[in-house]
Amino acid sequence: DDSTLRKRKIAEISNGKNNVPDDKLVETLREATEAITSPNMFLESIILLRNYMTKLTSSLEEEDEEGEYDDDDDDIAEAIRKRISKIIQFIVQLINEAESKVTVTPVLAIEMVTCLLELGLSSQSLKLMKRLTDENPECKKDPNCWLKIVEISELNGSNPKSSSKILRRALEYIPLHD
């Protein structure tokens, strides 16, 4: 039966013993980012964790959509939420480490702020992107970083005048001849 198979799959994903793969993933990525301290290693680690978190979130949504609840379902859902929380904490930690340990490239900067946005941390995302475009020469010259600031600002409810002001400021740093 399809429902039983899905419950078994979800149970495997959320089983307390199966936190071991989460711990191994986090530990492996921690070791990798310490051994190879590069923007690309942080970028790939954050992308991997975002994809992994999406998988966990979709299993939680499947659990919620089934509609038939019992105590086991509540336990499964709670276990998945705890796992997601642990992954979110590690993503935020990686983002902080990336900013302090490597020269953040524009691609990494955009990935970091996009991830923070997806986690519902829009004000932190905006602060980070503004800081990077102020302090990081690569981000300062990258039009995509400036456009990301505008995007986040508009998501936070800023008005079009604010967006045009940001873009005018960007023109001071972005060469038009490229």
Image: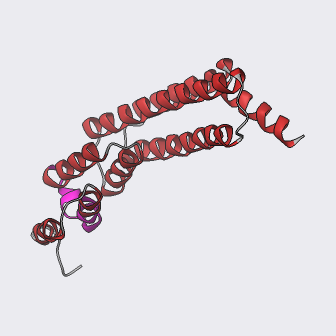
Q: Could you say where residue 23 lies in the image, as x and y percent from the top left?
A: 56, 23
Taking the image as shown, residue 144 lies to the left or right of residue 164, namely right
Residue 31 visible to the viewer: no
Whether 60 is drawn above or below 77: the answer is below
Taking the image as shown, residue 71 lies to the left or right of residue 90, namely right
Which picture quadrant has residue 46? Answer: top left
Q: Looking at the image, which residue sits at the far bottom?
A: 177
Taking the image as shown, residue 137 lies to the left or right of residue 65, namely left
Q: What residue lies at 68% left-to-right and 22% top-to-bottom?
A: 15
Which picture quadrant has residue 158? Answer: bottom left
Q: Could you say where residue 34 lies in the image, as x and y percent from the top left?
A: 40, 30
Q: What residue lies at 64% left-to-right and 38% top-to-bottom?
A: 64
In the image shown, does 152 or 87 lie closer to the viewer? 152
Whether 46 is drawn above or below 171: the answer is above
Position of the C terminus, as image quadrant, is bottom left
Whether 162 is drawn above or below 85: the answer is below
Taking the image as shown, residue 72 lies to the left or right of residue 101, namely right
For the magenta stretch, what is the residue range?
135-149
Whether 95 is drawn above or below 129: the answer is above
Q: Could you say where residue 4 lies in the image, as x and y percent from the top left?
A: 84, 35
Position of the N terminus, as image quadrant, is top right
